[in-house]
Image: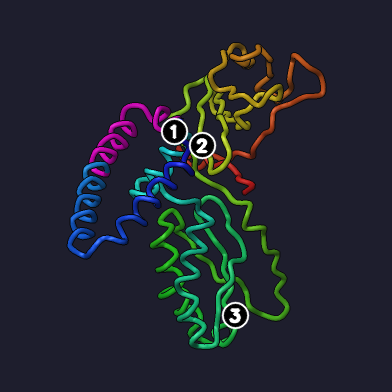
């Protein structure tokens, strides 16, 4: 089966050939491309909408495939990672701020809906800094990241102590609570990582979706009495402790989980 890199390479080769055609021929090719892409996007939009309503776990499993994810991302049917969208927003407004000898720094991403930023330069000590934040930074960030509803300008005083976080570590909404069947697991693709969520009543736990034996996915395994058995080689794990019951001193990689309302958030290490 072709991988994503090979498929993209094929597209680029055809694009290079078409670029050598005369203008009228290129217009026909581009028109055909747009018509096909519009058809595909309409079909994919309907498919995603149907899966969200009827079988959200199937949608998560489908997006786990890199080709599916790439095509949905191309058609803007899934969002890029939160950290990338924040960087894009700040990059967009940076020239405007720099034209006034100012800039903006991301200080912290605070799950699930807040970021802290710091204005530096001439904006940092002027009375209009709050207005600048509200009208420019906040507007642009919310355009790219509608889930961020609270944008805070941190204290710019000389005595303020800031503790910036590693922007490669942040929280991501991965599922709704009701998407996870009680006493079952739900597989989710979380950027470049595969995870699964396990729910027991109101308690939700998250692990890397990989058996410690050979790294094969665990979500297809049987779950019984808080123990999951790998479908490939029958390695058994206690889902309450992450401990492997088959081999000592081996455990699953866990992720920190938070629940706000009906939304489940997982801390991502990029």
Give the dominant element type of the magenta stretch: helix, strand or loop. helix
Q: Are marks 1 and 3 in contact (CB under 8 Å)?
A: no
On the image, numbered disc 3 is attached to which residue?
Answer: 120
Q: Earlier in the sequence, mark 2 or mark 1?
A: 1
- Residue at image position (48%, 61%) is 150
Q: Is residue 214 visible?
A: yes
Circle 2 residues within 10 Å: few <14, some 14–19, many ≥20: some
Q: Quadrant of residue 49?
A: top left
Horizontal placement of 181 versus 162: left or right? left
Q: What's drawn in magenta, residue-wise?
A: 41-62
In space, the residues marked 1 and 3 are separated at their CA atoms by 40 Å
Q: Are marks 2 and 1 in contact (CB under 8 Å)?
A: yes
Q: Earlier in the sequence, mark 1 or mark 3?
A: 1
- Residue at image position (56%, 88%) is 122
The residue closer to the viewer here, 248 or 159, is 248
Task: State whether residue 109 is above or below residue 178.
Answer: below
Q: Quadrant of residue 18?
A: bottom left
Q: Is residue 178 visible?
A: no
The residue closer to the viewer here, 82 or 28, is 28
On the image, numbered disc 1 is attached to which residue?
Answer: 60
Residue 259 percent location from the top left of the image: 53, 39
- Residue at image position (71%, 22%) is 213
The residue closer to the viewer here, 236 or 33, is 33
In space, the residues marked 3 and 2 are separated at their CA atoms by 37 Å
Mark 2: secondary structure: strand
The question of residue 37 being in magenta is answered with no
Tell me the number on the disc at residue 149: none
On the image, numbered disc 2 is attached to which residue?
Answer: 189
Coloring applied to the structure: rainbow
């Amino acid at each position: 089966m072709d991988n994503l890199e090979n498929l993209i390479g094929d597209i680029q080769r055809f694009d290079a050939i078409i670029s050598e055609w005369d203008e009228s021929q290129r217009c026909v090719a581009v028109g055909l491309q747009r018509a096909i892409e519009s058809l595909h996007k309409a079909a994919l939009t309907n498919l995603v909408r149907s899966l969200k309503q009827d079988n959200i776990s199937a949608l998560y499993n489908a997006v786990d495939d890199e080709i599916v994810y790439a095509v949905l991302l191309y058609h803007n049917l899934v969002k890029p990672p939160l950290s990338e969208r924040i960087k894009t927003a700040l990059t967009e407004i940076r020239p405007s701020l720099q034209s006034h000898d100012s800039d903006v720094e991301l200080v912290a991403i605070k799950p699930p809906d807040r970021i802290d930023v710091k204005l530096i330069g001439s904006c940092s000590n002027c009375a209009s800094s709050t207005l600048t934040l509200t009208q420019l930074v906040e507007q642009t960030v919310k355009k790219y990241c509608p889930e961020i509803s609270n944008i805070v300008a941190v204290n710019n005083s000389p005595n303020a102590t800031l503790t910036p976080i590693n922007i490669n570590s942040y929280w991501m909404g991965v599922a709704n609570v009701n998407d996870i069947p009680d006493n079952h697991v739900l597989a989710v693709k979380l950027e470049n990582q595969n995870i699964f969520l396990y729910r027991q009543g109101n308690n939700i736990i998250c692990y890397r979706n990989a058996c410690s034996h050979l790294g094969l996915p665990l979500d297809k395994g049987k779950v019984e009495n808080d123990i999951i058995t790998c479908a490939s080689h029958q390695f058994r794990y206690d889902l309450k402790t992450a401990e492997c019951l088959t081999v000592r001193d081996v455990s699953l990689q866990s992720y920190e989980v938070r629940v706000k309302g009906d939304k489940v958030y997982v801390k991502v290490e990029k």
